[in-house]
Amino acid sequence: MSRKSRRAQLRASSSKPSAGVITQKAGSGWSSDPATGRFFGPSLSSSGVAVTPFTALAVPAIYCASRVISEDIARMALNVERKTSTNCFETIAHPLNQLFKRWNAWQGKYDAISFLASSYALRGNAYCVVIRNNDGTPAYLVPISPDSCSVCLMADGRVFYMISHPLLQESAGIPVRQEDMLHIKNISFNGYVGISPIALLAESVGLSIALQQTAARVFSNVANIAGIIEYPESVDVSTMSQLADMWRQSYGGVTNAGKTAIIDSGGKFSKIAMTNEESQFLESRQFALTDIARIFRVPPHKLMMIESGAGESAAGKMIEVQHRQYIDETLRPFTERFEEEAEYKLLMLDERQTTRIRFDYDTLTKGTEMDRAEIYQSALNNGWYSRNEVRAREQLAPIPGGDEYRVSVQTLPNDKPKNNSDTNDSDEDV
């Protein structure tokens, strides 16, 4: 579709949707589907704790998981690529590249994408309004809080969105067509609105909040005694106070750690071990952490959970495998949904056949310098990359003659055996 046709379509569209719509309101980050809300009941979990995306962030593991996911996605470059004559894609100069660097007057790429990714992770929906120029090209991208957006379904199956935002200069909600809204949604019951993981798994989240609150009350209201000094005979209050002060001054604090205690008058020190209830309480908190990691599909090392029982080399291999799974199973569902929405609603019709929008995962998969050096050496020796392509990946300036693709003389076809000149030049590249 040309820009002129696009402009005509925009002008022909009604500014106000027709009657007979079904509004699906998103309240406090819960599912916008009323039937889903009735199915799962109130936000009060069985543990007696009210669960919302805001209260859930008070759990360190949930805060860490949402922050890790949103910031890792925001770190990646977002590029516009075009198919070449060899069916490869390369980054091109496109107006969207500048828009992706500065989405609006108050948000750059990092802030905007991390906001969308955290909304998707916690609330199951991420919304972004496309404000267009007169010719239909995108001028600004404005992320919208799920609390400020309602999804409305028309009788013919089309969707529009009722939103409120200061940029729109209207306090009441105004309609936004589906063509002008980037909507990235989680798994859905109706295909129109995503389900909030916090709402869907309120019981598990509520348990984590309840355990954390219980631990805080225990440490604030209950005396935590490391041991008891027993005497064979009764001791008056004054002597007891003097003994307690002497014990604290002589053996309390970090500076007195490791000293040998001397108890006179027949006193005996007995250390208090952890009770079964305390041990089970700690196990419950550990299980809650594992449950949260399972909800967000975040590996333990991303939540700063240290796994014991494996050697250093084995632990490193395990983390490497988990990081690969984290990219494929946690980050890609959001990025691929975003790419599909952006390509359909930000590119013109005549561009969609040859142009695409992609997140660049090189930032997350680059590896160490030794890993990259090994990959580059293999790529250069086998002609996958030229030297300038390697330098570009390392953000270095090109060099003269660096665009040539080279292979080692050791990799000759079987029907062309090496001659003497090949043997003499075996250490050189051709």
Image (cartoon, grey):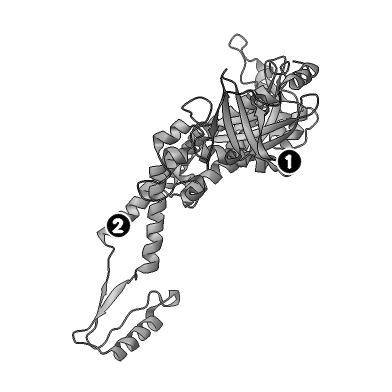
Residue type at mark 2 is Ser
Kindly identify which numbered label has been placed on residue 169. 1
**Quadrant, the C terminus:** top right
- Residue 253, image x, y percentages: 43, 76
Q: Position of residue 409 (x, y in %)?
A: 65, 20
Left-right relation of 317 to 340: left
Using the numbered discs, state the Cα–Cα distance from disc 1 to disc 2 in whole angstroms.
56 Å
- Label 2 CA crowd tier, 10 Å (few <14, some 14–19, many 20+): few
Q: Earlier in the sequence, mark 1 or mark 2?
A: 1
Q: Which residue is mark 2?
A: 279
429 and 45: which one is in front?
Answer: 45
Above or below, 239 against 173 in this view is: below
Quadrant where the N terminus is found in the figure: top right
Q: Amino acid at mark 1?
A: Gln
Residue at 38% over, 74% down? 258
Can residue 289 be seen at all in this image of the molecule? no
Residue at 80% x, 18% y is 4
